[in-house]
Every structure is written in C-alpha cells, then in structure tokens.
Amino acid sequence: MTVLCTSKLSGAHRSFVSIMWIQYLIIALLFAGAAWYVGRIFWRSFFSKDQTACAKGCGGACSTIDVDRLQRTIELAAAREGAKA
C-alpha cells in the first residue's frame, strides 16, 4: 500500500493537490447551498406560519374555494352542452 506524503511531492504537484482540494471544497459548498435552498422551499410549503400558503405561492387561493359558484359554473356548462345537442 502506497502512502502519499506531501513532503516528498514537488512544488508543482503539491500546488495541484491543494487546487484540487479547493475545487472539492467549492463543489461541496455549492451542493450544500443547493440542498439547503431546496429544503427551505419544501419546509415553507408544508410548515408555513399561516395556513393559507401553498406551493403555488399565490397567497391562499386554494383554500378559498367557493363551492356554490363552482356548482353554478358546472350547471351552466351542462345547460350549454344540452342546448348544443
């Protein structure tokens, strides 16, 4: 088994290794930031402070469904379909 010792590496190879670790660090930070951002979006969609929020972000249009208006719209569409036939 070969053990890599940085004291035996040349100056150019040692700088390459350090640049590689910096790249890994940048990629890890970007991944962690993206995971945090997506997690925050999911958290806010399920556990918002007000109960009217949804994933659509409209401010609660989903929770204010007017059932009577919906029923009138359905009956009007059925009446129009019956008049065409």
Image (cartoon, rainbow, N blue to C red):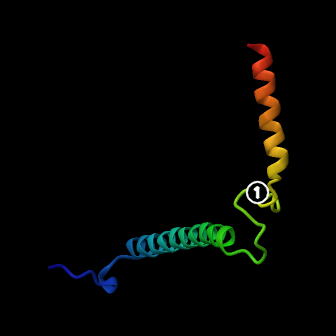
Task: Give above or below for 14 relative to 72.
Answer: below
Mark 1, residue position: 62
Task: Give above or below for 8 relative to 29.
Answer: below
- Give the quadrant of residue 35: bottom right
Image coords of residue 29 (percent x, y): 56, 73
| Residue 17 located left or right of residue 72 | left
Relative depth, front residue between 51 and 45: 51
Image coords of residue 65 (percent x, y): 80, 54
Image coords of residue 72 (percent x, y): 83, 40
- Give the quadrant of residue 6: bottom left
Location of the C terminus (image quadrant): top right
Location of the N terminus (image quadrant): bottom left
Name the kind of residue labelled 1 in the image. Answer: Cys
**Residues packed near mark 1 inside 10 Å, few (<14), some (14 to 19) or many (20 plus):** few
Image coords of residue 61 (percent x, y): 81, 56
| Residue 73 located left or right of residue 19 | right
- Give the quadrant of residue 76: top right
Relative depth, front residue between 17 and 62: 62
Q: What SS does tag 1 mark? A: loop
Q: Which residue occupies 33% across, 86% down? A: 7
Q: Which residue occupies 80% across, 26% down? A: 79
Q: Which residue occupies 76% across, 78% down? A: 49
